[in-house]
């Protein structure tokens, strides 16, 4: 995790060779985190690259720039892309205020994402959304078609299955999480707030299941008109494979890639292949 020091450049020297793109990147610093006011929030974000293809990275539940998108921030072709990654409202360093997990928090975050990118003077862009970020990305693409160039989503679902709700309830207690999964979140929020946030998130899923019959955003799928790429790890323990076919069927013109050995976070555990496939999709006519 990064120290909470604004506009501070940590000196490193890194040489990366991306064999797939035959490009060499030389960097002398980590990206600078910046703050911009959007409504009631001060949004923390990074912006890297100088390319003409603009991207917004939307993290998963409780996720931040560095917990969720480090391989993309560091690995994207910075001559072809301009990548923006944010801490969503109420997450990471985009607080106070704290997150309110109401039944419409996905749509509120999608609306804020649009306002945020307009404030950065980036009127049109593609979205990379993981898990909760994929849900927000779908809503954003449906509501703001003139601002959305392409959509890439993985580990995302538009409704909640009964067995998925049971999984959420079983992992409500953060002490049931592995140390590897728990510690990064504790570093961001502290143990007390992390435990509260995650419990509140599970409560929100239960409320959505009861009040909306499990529907999160299925009503928006028919309005997604931009080219859409759906990726899925077939060993995902949180998101059932039925969601892939549902999204593919209901998002016109969407395409799919399956990772037979992939889990929920294919963009991290299979970052090189993931980045290559996503960049190819985004650069295609």
Image (cartoon, helix red, strand yellow):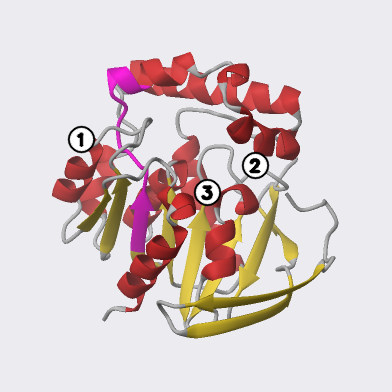
Task: Please rate how many residues cluster around mark 3, counting C-alpha atoms within 10 Å: few if below 14, some from 14 to 19, many from 20.
Answer: many
Q: CA distance from mark 2 to mark 3?
A: 10 Å
The segment highlighted magenta reads: 151-164
What residue is drawn where x is 31% and y is 71%? Answer: 281
Classify 244 as above or below 212: below
Assess whether residue 239 is covered by the magenta stretch.
Answer: no
Classify 237 as above or below 53: above
Q: CA distance from mark 2 to mark 1?
A: 29 Å
**Residue picked out by circle 1:** 242
Q: CA distance from mark 1 to mark 3?
A: 22 Å
Instruction: Return the mark for residue 91.
Output: 2
Residue 49 locus on image (x, y percent): 58, 78
Secondary structure found at label 3: loop
Secondary structure found at label 2: loop
Q: Is residue 149 visible?
A: no
Judging depth in this view, the residue of 252 and 154 nearest the camera is 154
Mark 2 touching mark 3, by CB under 8 A? yes
Q: Horizontal placement of 158 versus 84: left or right?
A: left
Residue 41 locus on image (x, y percent): 69, 48
**Residue picked out by circle 3:** 59
Q: Is residue 185 visible?
A: yes
Q: Horizontal placement of 242 versus 172: left or right?
A: left
Determine the image quadrant of residue 7.
Answer: bottom right
């Amino acid at each position: 995790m990064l120290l909470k020091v604004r506009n501070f450049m940590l000196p490193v020297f890194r040489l990366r060779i991306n064999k797939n793109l035959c490009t060499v990147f030389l960097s002398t610093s980590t990206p600078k985190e910046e703050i911009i006011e959007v409504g009631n929030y001060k949004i923390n974000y990074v912006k890297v690259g100088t390319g003409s293809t603009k991207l917004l990275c939307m993290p998963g539940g409780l996720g931040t720039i560095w917990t969720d998108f480090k391989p993309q921030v560091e690995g994207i072709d910075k001559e072809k892309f301009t990548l923006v990654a944010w801490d969503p409202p109420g997450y990471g360093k985009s607080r106070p205020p704290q997150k309110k997990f109401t039944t419409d928090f996905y749509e509120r975050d999608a609306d804020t994402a649009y306002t945020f990118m307009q404030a950065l003077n980036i009127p049109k862009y593609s979205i990379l959304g993981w898990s909760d970020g994929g849900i927000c990305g779908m809503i954003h693409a449906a509501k703001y078609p003139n601002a959305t160039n392409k959509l890439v989503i993985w580990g995302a679902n538009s409704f909640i299955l009964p067995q998925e709700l049971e999984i959420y309830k079983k992992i409500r207690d953060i002490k049931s999480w592995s140390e590897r999964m728990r510690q990064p979140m504790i570093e961001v929020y502290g143990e007390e707030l992390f435990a509260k946030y995650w419990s509140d998130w599970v409560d929100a899923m239960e409320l959505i299941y009861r009040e909306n019959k499990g529907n999160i955003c299925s009503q928006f799928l028919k309005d997604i008109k931009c080219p859409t790429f759906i990726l899925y790890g077939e060993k995902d323990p949180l998101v059932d494979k039925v969601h892939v076919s549902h999204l593919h069927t209901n998002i016109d013109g969407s395409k799919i890639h399956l990772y037979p050995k992939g889990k929920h976070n294919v963009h991290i555990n299979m970052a090189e292949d993931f980045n290559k496939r996503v960049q190819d999709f985004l650069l295609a006519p």
